[in-house]
Structure formats: structure tokens, C-alpha cells
Image: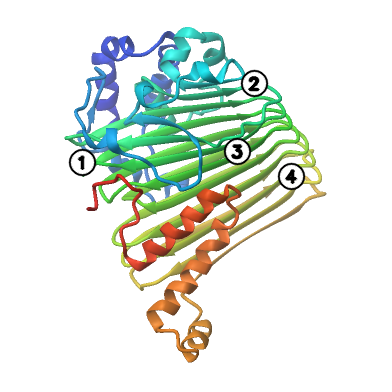
Amino acid sequence: MPVQNYIKLFRENRRLLESGSSAVLNGRRDVALENLEKYGLPSNSMEEYLHSNVSEWFEPDWGINLGRIDIPTSSAAAFRCNVPNLNARSYFMLNDIFEAERSPDRTTLQEVIIAGSVRELSLERPDIIERYYDTISDTNKAGAAAINTLFAQDGFVLYISDNVTVEKPIQLVSLLSSPVDLMVNRRVLIIVGTNVRVKLLLCDHAISPAAFLTTQVVELFAGQGSNIELYDLEETHAAGFRFNELYLKQDSYTDVTVNLITLHNGKTRNSVYATLEGGGASLSLNGVAITDKSQHVDNFTFVDHRVPNCTSSELFNYVLDQQSVGVFAGKVLVRPGAQHTVSQQKNRNICLTRQSRVFTQPQLEIYADDVKCSHGATVGRLDENALFYMRQRGIPEQEARMLLLIAFVNEVIDLVELEPFRNRLKRLVEKRFRGELSQCEGCRVCR
């Protein structure tokens, strides 16, 4: 569907769309509309999307649930994202609507932690949502943010006040379910105060075989001295199109870890825009993609070092099989005056067939003279010497190949500090390479 069709759809249904939302969300739509008209949808004619023609993802005549009609689904109610021993506080979204009846009552968390529906909280506490919603996401370019802001009616919000250690991980389980092909526009707003420690897990699952186009915009505010771990896991299916943008703003002495894991998908574009605005901030940004068939994974990162004495590290490992495609483009910008910046960026790729493809473009742009920055990328096949060594010791070739691939992927998985989730990932990765069902318990798509 061309961009003009989306604009027309919005204008013709604006009253209906806004009736199911709130004043704060509705107040951001005019700027998003103006920017969508100006910049349009992304396409591979733009350098940032050179190897991912995402404009094709928007061409089908997707259904959009503007009237917030209840979608009948029995599988969603039974679904559990099973991570043994995680002991997380789990919240649920069905498509782009927060499911309050399946999520914990936020009043039990008192005022130090507020979690729930963006729409509901913007009605009850507009001071919080107005201050943060759509303030670091960028609709001033071709991307998912403009169309997401235009059509989003709900989402998930997490607000943590100062000096809080959140003992249990907080998990957001986003389920895609529909009897017809559907476009889903989801918002996630995470506001972390000063001196906070929290672990966050975002899980995306498809539980019906319909095709989905998901636009997701995540805004994460890291307050001074906070320690945040954010893990994003995608386990959908081949009929899924995911356009995910994460915007991160770090204050001074923050320590943030972001890990993007793609185990099952159709076509995925993850974009991370990280701004280090306070001295002493540290960012660890990592990712894993395992693909086969005609799957496509594109990870784009932009790390903006604006002040001195900050560090960032990136490690993205891909394993590509059959006709799948992987893309990595990472840019680190060190602005004038951002002295003593330390930055390292690595992208490593294994192509298992001649038909698989990977495009990699690590970049450094430095305007300060007292920095330590490096970047690099490798593309290759399995180490034949290591394979030969293992076979000489009696390990069958297929098993040896799988063990080498697991070790390659675990280089990133081992950076996951949340032990139950790390153990679960290792099990899922092994099952993925063995060709076994590796969806979480409750998924019926592949059964």
C-alpha cells in the first residue's frame, strides 16, 4: 500500500482511531503525519536500507484494527512464554493492545514502579506520559516511527522511580494473533529513574499462521547511575514482517546492556539509536541472528557519543543457511569534545551455503583526537581445520558442525547476564540447529 494510501486511511478514520486512544497519543499524530508526507516510507534507494527493501513490506493491503475490535483467539489465553526459573513479573500484549486481565495489577507495585497500558496511564497520569512519550523517537526521517506514531493506540509503559532495585525481571510478552493478515503498531515506553537496577525481557511470538506487519517503537530512558539489561527475543514465523526501532537515552554513569536475538522470523529490521548524553555512560549492544530458507534479518545500530569518558561495545554474530540474507550496518559517531571515548564494534558471520548472503558495513566517524575506537567484520564458513580435528576424534560430521555453530553463537549468548534466560537461549539455539521445534511452550504455529 503506497504511503498516500496510509495517509488517506488515517485522515478518513482519524476520529475512530483517536476515540480508542488518549489525548497524549493523539497530540503527537499531526507532526508524524507531516513527516510521513515529507519523507515517505523507507526503501532501498536510501543508504540506511540499501540491502533491505522494506517498502515492499508495506505494499500489501494490510488490515488495521482501528476500532479496537476484540479478536477471537483461544490460543492466546493459553500461551505461556516458558523460561524455567525466570520468576519474572510478566505482562501481556495481544497485537498492539495491552491485556490488563492477564497482567499483574499495577497497584500492587505501589508508586515506585508503575507498569501497564500506555493509553490507560496517559489518562490517569498524563504528566508522566506527556513528559516522555515520543520525545526521543524520531519521525523526522523515513522509518517506522512516523507510521507507528500515526496509528498507535496503545502499548506498554514501565515507570521506575529513583533508588529502586527491581528484584524480579520484568517480562513483556507480545503475541500476534489474527484470523486475517494484520498490521500491528505497538509502543513500548520505559522510564528508569536514577540509581535503578532492572532486568527487562521483551518477547515477540506469533501464535496464528496469518501474515503480520509489526511496527514497534521502544523508547528507553536510563536515569543517572542506573543499571539496565534489556533482552529482545523474536520467535515468530516465516509470514512475519517486523520493523522494530529502539531509541535509548543514557544519562551519566549508566550501564546499559541491549541484546537482540532473532531465532525465528520472516523478514526483520531492528534499528537501535543510542545516545550517550552523560559522562561515564557505558553501553553493551549485542545481537544474534540464525536464519534459513528465505528469512531476512537486518540489524542497524547508531551509537552517538556526545560527551567525554563513555564506552560502547558491539558484537553481532549471524549464522545464515539456505537462501537467507543477513545485513549489519553499525555506525559509531564520536562528536567534537567527546574525549576519552572507548568504542569497539564487531560483526562476525558464517554462511553455510553459497546461496546465503550477508552484507556488513561497520563505520566510525570520529571528531575527537583522544579516543580508542575500532571496528571490524568477518564473513566465512565453518573452520574446516576444527571440523577435521573433531571428526578425527570420533565426532560425526553433522554433530561436529552443530557444536561449532553453537560455540559461535554462544559467544554472544554468554553475554546475557540473566542466567535463566541465558540457559533457555542455549537450549533453544541447540534445538534450532538440530532442526527441532524450538518455539516456546504454548505456540501452535509449527505443531
Quarter residue 8 falls in: top left
Q: Decide which of 73, 53 is in the foreground and name it.
A: 73
SS class, disc 1: loop
Report the disc number at residue 367. 4
Residue 25 at x, y = what percent?
43, 15
Label number found at residue 274: 3
Residue 234 vs 106, above or below: the answer is below
Per the model, the C-alpha gap separating discs 1 and 4 is 48 Å
- Amino acid type, callout 2: Ser
Q: Position of residue 320 (x, y in %)?
A: 40, 64
At mark 4, the secondary structure is loop
The quadrant holding residue 68 is top left
Q: Secondary structure at mark 3?
A: strand
**Contact flag, marks 3 and 4 (Cβ < 8 Å):** no
Callout 1–callout 3 Cβ contact below 8 Å:
no
Question: In percent of the image, x 29 and y 61: which residue is there?
Answer: 293
Residue labelled with disc 1: 210
Q: Earlier in the sequence, mark 1 or mark 3?
A: 1
The residue under label 2 is 161
